[in-house]
Amino acid sequence: MQLISALITTSFGRSGARTTTSAVRSYCGNTAAFSGCGLRNNQSLPSLIPVPAIPHTQFGRAFLKTMTQPSITSTPSTTPTLNRFKRVKLESNPPPSHLELSNKVIGTHSGTFQADEALGVWLLRQTPAYYRAGVIRTRNPAVLEDSCDLVLDVGGVYDHEKLRYDHHQRGYDERFTFDENGDDNGDDHPNTQITKLSASGLIYRHYGRTVISAFYPRLTPPQVEIVFNELYTQFCEAIDAIDTGVDVAPTGTVLYRDSTNLSSRIGRLNPRWNEPSDDDGNGPSPDERFEHASLVCGEECLSILSNIVESQLPARQF
């Protein structure tokens, strides 16, 4: 113990504000023990060294005091700690055991695709009801009506009960709004976003919480609401705004922020008019390109979602 105290006194200096690797390793015993101390991720140190919650400016003296306490238990805890901020990997192959591949069909328009419907399809495919569902791309009303369980970005109808999510019809004026609890309720409210919802915005309104809970099932309902609002503001709104023609700053005031440039990137994935054919004379498949575009939208969404849940949300506890 005298050797440990000497090492720590040397490492801390008079200010007692900083420890060093050598000091802690001397106490833990070796490098393997040191790696288990968990100084970098707030996990508990081995039971020989309990770490109290103390201000950084007092870390040195308080830490030295805990190390010199005479009665310390050495029985390790056997109770597992659940990390509510850990993401479920829905994209794994084979799929997670709690999910079954959906036999439902999602319909959207054919031709040139945008980030709008590509993101909407990806969001739906993360839900249990439409997990990895098939997609039909057509503008034929009969096919959309008879062969598709859900239709987005085509058809001229927005009706959640009928599972129709288009935004091109006259008189359409759906926007993302927040009630007092931060929920999007579709009603008039002072905190109504300036941007009209595109098809992906409509899908997010009705299925966004389900998607968030699918990836992070241990979040509490209030935490899901926080993430739901933040993901729309940080990611989804820009997709809506660009698709519905809203300028970023028409009068000099920034109305929304586009941090990904996703809409432009997805647009470039469409086959070019003069794109060469393969050796068999076949041109690029628009449907295959759409599937790739949808995956790109999903990767971007997951990147921002994981940052909100795994970084920003835990920071609210401090």
Image: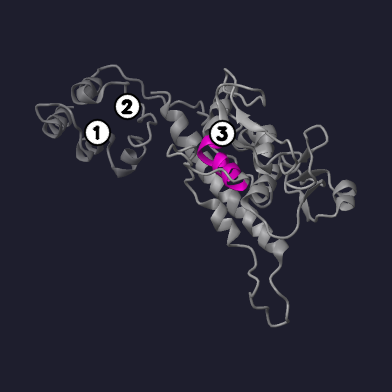
**Residue drawn at x 49%, y 37% as measured from the top left:** 255
* Residue, disc 1: 27
Amino acid type, label 1:
Tyr
Amino acid type, label 2:
Leu
Q: Position of residue 115 (x, y in %)?
A: 62, 51
Does residue 132 lie above or below 3 as drawn?
below
- Circles 1 and 3: CB atoms closer than 8 Å: no
Tell me the chief SS of the magenta region: helix
* Residue, disc 3: 194
User: Could you tell whether 158 is left or right of 5 in the image?
Assistant: right
Label 1 CA crowd tier, 10 Å (few <14, some 14–19, many 20+): some
SS at mark 1? helix
Q: CA distance from mark 1 to mark 3?
A: 59 Å
Does the magenta portion include 237?
Answer: yes
> Observer-nearest residue: 95 or 262?
262
Q: Quadrant where the N terminus lies?
A: top left
The boundaries of the magenta stretch are 231-243
- The mark that comes first in sequence, 3 or 2, is 2
Identify the disc placed on residue 48. Answer: 2
Q: CA distance from mark 1 to mark 2?
A: 9 Å
Does residue 150 lie above or below 277 as drawn?
above
